[in-house]
Image: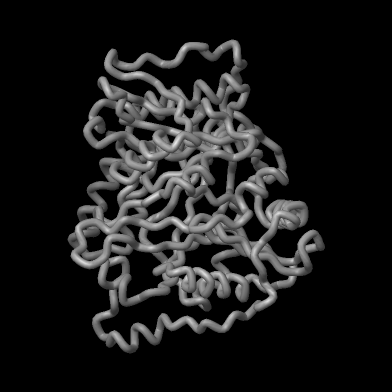
Amino acid sequence: MGTFAKTAKLIIAQMRNNQEYDRISVLEDLIPLFEPHKFWDSQPVPKVTDQLSLSEEQFDCPIETKSVDDIPEEPYALPVQYSWDDLDLADDTVAEEVYDLLVRNYVEVDEVIFRFDYSIPFLRWSLMPPNGNPRWLVGVRAGKRKKLFGMITAIPVTMMLKGQEVLCAEVNFLCVHKDLRTKRLAPVLIKEVTRRINRCNIWQAIYTSGTTIPTPFTGAAYWHRSLNPKKLIEVRFSYKPAKQSMAQYLKRHYLSSQLELPSLRLMQDADVPQVTVLLNNHLSSKTKVHITYSEEEVRHFFLPREDVINTFVDGGAPGETLTDIFSYYYLPSSVLNHPQHNLLKVAYSYYNASTTGRLKEGMRDMLIRAKEQGCDVFNALDVMENKQHFEELKFGIGDGLLHYYLYNWRVKEVGPEDLGIVLV
């Protein structure tokens, strides 16, 4: 353990003795960055000391440069009983296996009370874009039945990194079966998907994690707007202040059903060109790090899909110039070990853009739409312009940060408001 990590742990112990709990989380997030990381120290990722030790010329550029000829053609070796597999999510059997692996072994939050419950339509939406590479959906199987024990996925995205267009991979769904957590399979999965991406002459990637690894370029907090406050208390997602009655608490979180922008309508295929223009113009003018979307990607990611994605637009009839876009996706969480509830229905803010100054009104209408859909809570990251209206819309900040990472690229001075990317 490094000197900083040792010192920080001593300070945290003292803080606990003094009951200075509000300051502890900041130090706890920093400690992992100063501890040795056998795997990440071997990878082209930023170091925590870069901001102080490197010159300006060493930012906004790759950390290392290689060619496809430097990358092995053969996959990384696995133990004898294990084998690599390309995951064909169009196959219903494979999709069910992926769903089962994730729902039983993927991210658990809040002291193992909740676990993300990615539906098969959601997985196909997030992992099968029109420009996707099936070789980037990587699985590990074992045994006579070739059971799926691990996976990692990536899709190609065109990123704008402070004015530079860079073709990247968006890496997601790193998941290892609980029985294999001690087998160090995760680093091998990361190296294998990196190899496959590099063989396509792509050298940068973006990814997120709720844990701290070397080294995030920014972090965003989740904020929550209660839509079904009584249920949220029952499942321990929220807590009622001790001095507040239930009636007072419910009144505090009341949401009128009266829409402020009744002219908003569901996006249609004819809107794709206009949504593409409006979205890309908004992201390029408001943020420093963002995705640039093609029309084909907008068609895939933004056209409404039942229980997956809803996008609303305003400004004209289909095909005419649009002034506003508001969207959210649907990602429930399993409620574990609860006698009454087994599912938390959650909406997540996706991308919003308004040229008419109606961001607050549009976001409020998304709360109403999500509640009409049966959602219990509406989550949003404080990226882009979102945070401006959180308090007025009665959002409350959640615990911890979602850390954003770039592989083989350094950037400097990026706040969440400068970030125009939402990874599902």
Which coloring applies here? Answer: one colour
Task: Tell me residue 273's x, y (percent).
Answer: 77, 52
Q: Is residue 37 above or below residue 206?
A: above
Q: Which one is nearer the viewer's eye here, 20 or 410? A: 410
Q: Which one is nearer the viewer's eye here, 275 or 285? A: 275
Residue 54 falls in image quadrant: top right
Q: Which one is nearer the viewer's eye here, 346 or 381? A: 346
Q: Residue at x 26, y 85 (%)?
A: 243
Task: Tell me residue 387's x, y (percent).
Answer: 54, 66
Residue 398 falls in image quadrant: bottom left
Q: Is residue 176 above or below residue 383?
A: above
Task: Tell me residue 140's x, y (percent).
Answer: 36, 25
Decide if residue 117 is on the left or right side of residue 301: left
Decide if residue 192 is on the left or right side of residue 19: right
Decide if residue 325 is on the left or right side of residue 375: right
Residue 289 visible at all: no
Report the number of numbered marks: 0
Residue 354 falls in image quadrant: bottom right
Residue 220 visible at all: yes
Which residue extends farthest right? 320
Q: Residue at x 42, y 66 (%)?
A: 397
